[in-house]
């Protein structure tokens, strides 16, 4: 059985983003302060989770709210990635790759939100 959200390009791209974030966090495992790692993992994971849950909602207002939450979680990742780059936990190239992925996912989420008609 295939769930409808699994067919969405934004879901697939967000899952890839999570995999990349988890790989990054695995390489940062030696950090004593796990706050950044934990926050980044939770925010990144929230993106596909909210896409999936929103896609399962019947009412458009609920769908949109979950998609807005997915976008907010994605936006939450950006300053954490920027901070990781600034304190040199993250190489500039890896930052650029993740930032571009986030940017693309953000655009896709905006399109998804717009595609859901406002209403009940």
Image (cartoon, rainbow, N blue to C red):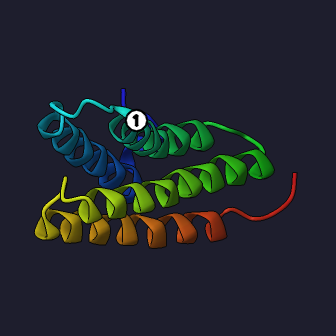
| Residue 83 percent location from the top left of the image | 35, 59
Look at 28% across and 65% down and name the residue there.
86
Q: Which residue is mark 1?
A: 35
Quarter of the image that includes the N terminus: top left
Look at 16% across and 40% down and name the residue there.
23
Quarter assignment of residue 72: bottom right
Residue farthest to the top?
Answer: 1
Quarter assignment of residue 62: top right
Look at 58% across and 36% down and name the residue there.
53
Q: How would you rate the neighbour count of disc 1 (Cα within 10 Å): few for under 14, some for 14-19, many for 20 or more?
A: few
Between 108 and 39, which is closer to the camera in this rendering?
Answer: 39
Apparent side of residue 117 relative to residue 3 in the rendered image (left or right): right
Between 23 and 4, which is closer to the camera in this rendering?
Answer: 23
| Residue 76 percent location from the top left of the image | 50, 55
Apparent side of residue 47 relative to residue 33 in the rendered image (left or right): right
Q: Taking 87 as reference, is 6 above or below it?
A: above
Count the marks. 1
Secondary-structure class at tag 1: helix
Look at 50% across and 61% down and name the residue there.
75
Apparent side of residue 87 relative to residue 30 in the rendered image (left or right): right
Q: Taking 102 as reference, is 2 above or below it?
A: above
| Residue 48 percent location from the top left of the image | 44, 43
| Residue 87 percent location from the top left of the image | 25, 59
Apparent side of residue 35 relative to residue 16 in the rendered image (left or right): right
Between 34 and 98, which is closer to the camera in this rendering?
Answer: 34
């Amino acid at each position: 059985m295939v769930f409808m959200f699994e067919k969405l390009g934004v879901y697939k791209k967000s899952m890839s983003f999570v995999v990349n974030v988890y790989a990054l966090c695995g390489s940062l495992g030696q950090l004593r302060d796990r706050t950044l790692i934990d926050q980044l993992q939770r925010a990144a994971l929230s993106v596909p989770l909210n896409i999936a849950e929103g896609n399962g909602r019947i009412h458009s207002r609920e769908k949109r709210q979950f998609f807005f939450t997915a976008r907010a979680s994605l936006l939450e990742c950006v300053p954490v990635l920027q901070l990781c780059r600034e304190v040199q936990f993250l190489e500039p190239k890896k930052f650029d790759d993740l930032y571009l992925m986030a940017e693309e996912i953000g655009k896709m989420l905006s399109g998804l939100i717009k595609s859901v008609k406002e209403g009940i």
